[in-house]
Amino acid sequence: MQQADLIKRIKELKLKRNAVILSHYYSRPEVQDIADFVGDSLALSQEALRQDAEVIVFCGVHFMGESAAILSPNKTVLLPEIDASCPMADMLDVEELKRLKEKHPDAPVVSYVNSSAAIKAESYICCTSANAVEVVNSLDADEVIFVPDKNLAAYVAARTDKKIIIWEGHCPTHHQILREDVLNMKEKHPQAKFIAHPECRPEVLEIADHVASTRGMMLYAKNSPAQEFIIGTECGLIHGLLKAAPEKKYYCISEFACCPSMKMVNLEKVLTSLENMQHRVAVPKDVRVKAKEALDRMLSVIVK
Ligand code: 13P
Ligand code: SF4
């Protein structure tokens, strides 16, 4: 089917199913373009709550669909690609977290939303890259277990007085961005600001002009007087940046800054998802209720 026909059919089915399409900034450009809302993990969770459509088609990875299903149990959440899982989320399982909790019984668990529903259910509170520092600082505890991203944990540790117990997970896409990639790009584009996601290595963040979630990076580039930016995250963000501030220039940090899981959803799969009402995200009730408590606690933390 031609792209225009695919888009037409998706729009028809969206109306028929009373569905809304949510997409992360890392999705393919054509998928972002048909979405009703594109955002970072925090904004997507908030948007899933706000929507009154019956069906949410979530163009992203598994944990994102799960978060929407946990927050909105009365809606049907569909993942166009069921195998799109986040490798970082897969770096920690519940038994490992339980053992960590046993070793540090007084430390509340903060889980980055890039984790399974079962991990969220074992956590006191969740966070995203947009609110991790505020979430940790909101806790009445001297030490905190932070899972699963060691880079985001190190970023938080540098901005809090609390002791952070770090799990050694990482995002392969961000971890592959090296300090020398940044230095090379800075040499090629000396006027450009380097903006980076906190999932990058500490030695990369150290030389960034600005560190923020994907949405924060977007706002910074849009509002900054600078005209050129080196993008230290998954390069799908450049599509959104070009829409938000088309007059500026954006340079992808490296050819490896691409998340294969986030690219699995395409227009054909969105259409099949709406046609067959697949793949429904199901979270067992006991897990869902506990995971929702951790997500609700996160959503009640005000970010300045
Ligand atoms: P944010 O959406 O919080 O910026 O995180 C990026 C990410 O890696 C999502 O998988
Ligand atoms: Fe997971 Fe990294 Fe891909 Fe985000 S970019 S979905 S953290 S692997």
Image (cartoon, rainbow, N blue to C red):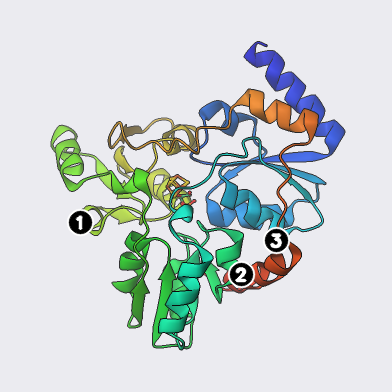
At which x and y percent is residue 118?
Answer: 60, 64
On screen, residue 154 above or below 220? below
Mark 1 secondary-structure assignment: helix
Q: Which residue is mark 1?
A: 203
Label 3, ligand 1: CB separation under 8 Å: no
Query: Would you identify the image quadrant in which residue 69 lies?
Result: bottom right
Mark 2 secondary-structure assignment: helix
At which x and y percent is residue 218?
Answer: 44, 46
Which is nearer the N-term, disc 1 or disc 3?
3
Query: Would you identify the image quadrant in which residue 229 lies?
Result: top left
Question: Where does the N terminus fall, quadrant-wise?
Answer: top right
Q: Which residue is mark 2?
A: 121
Mark 3 secondary-structure assignment: helix
- How far apart are labels 1 and 3 at the CA level? 36 Å
Q: Residues within 10 Å of mark 3 (few under 14, many from 20)?
A: many
The residue positioned 55% from the left and 73% from the top of the image is: 123
Give the amino acid type for the residue marked by disc 1 in the picture. Answer: Glu
Q: Which residue is mark 3?
A: 71
